[in-house]
Amino acid sequence: MPVSMMAIYKRPEGGEEAMETFRRRYADEHLPLVRRTPGLVSLTVDKVAEAFGDTDLVLVTQMVFEDRAHLDAGLSSDAMRAAGRNLREIAPGMSTLIVLEPDTEMEPTVPSAPTIEDLLPA
């Protein structure tokens, strides 16, 4: 069952110049290291377009692995260790890393679309 690791980033101190520096270094230095992680199935990076509540979150990265064993192997790889060292350099204190596993007891149900009969007056 797929397992994800998410990295959630806060806005760096130092205004827009600091933000641009972080984004450039993240794209040019950090992501190439992460992409070399063995077992990585997919990698997505999303900017926070809108947040509800008082937050300074600006970026979310999701790394998907085939299962927990592949995630654990990836985390102990040389590529991920290099990525971790780089992250501590370019984003000190800005990130929270979390591992997500499907909660099969909480699978959401999507309501069925109404049929034409449901929409007609009785």
Image (tube, rainbow, N blue to C red):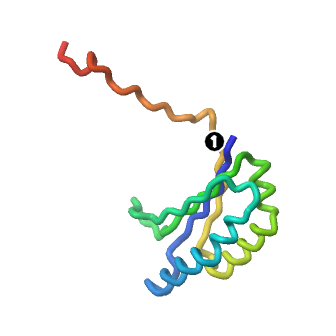
Q: Position of residue 43 (x, y in %)?
A: 61, 59
Q: Is residue 21 left or right of residue 33?
A: left
| Residue for point 48% across, 69% down | 58
Residue wearing tag 1: 102
Against 24, residue 68 (above or below) is above
Q: Quadrant of the N terminus?
A: top right
| Residue for point 67% across, 52% down | 41
| Residue for point 59% across, 58% down | 62
> Camera-side residue: 6 or 34?
34
Against 102, residue 36 (above or below) is below
Against 89, residue 108 (above or below) is above
Q: Position of residue 72 (x, y in %)?
A: 79, 55
Q: Position of residue 85 (x, y in %)?
A: 73, 76
| Residue for point 66% across, 71% down | 32
Against 64, residue 81 (above or below) is below
Q: Please identify the quarter of the rendering in which residue 115 is found.
A: top left
Q: Is residue 29 left or right of residue 118?
A: right
Disc 1 residue type? Pro
Q: Please identify the quarter of the rendering in which residue 38 is found.
A: bottom right
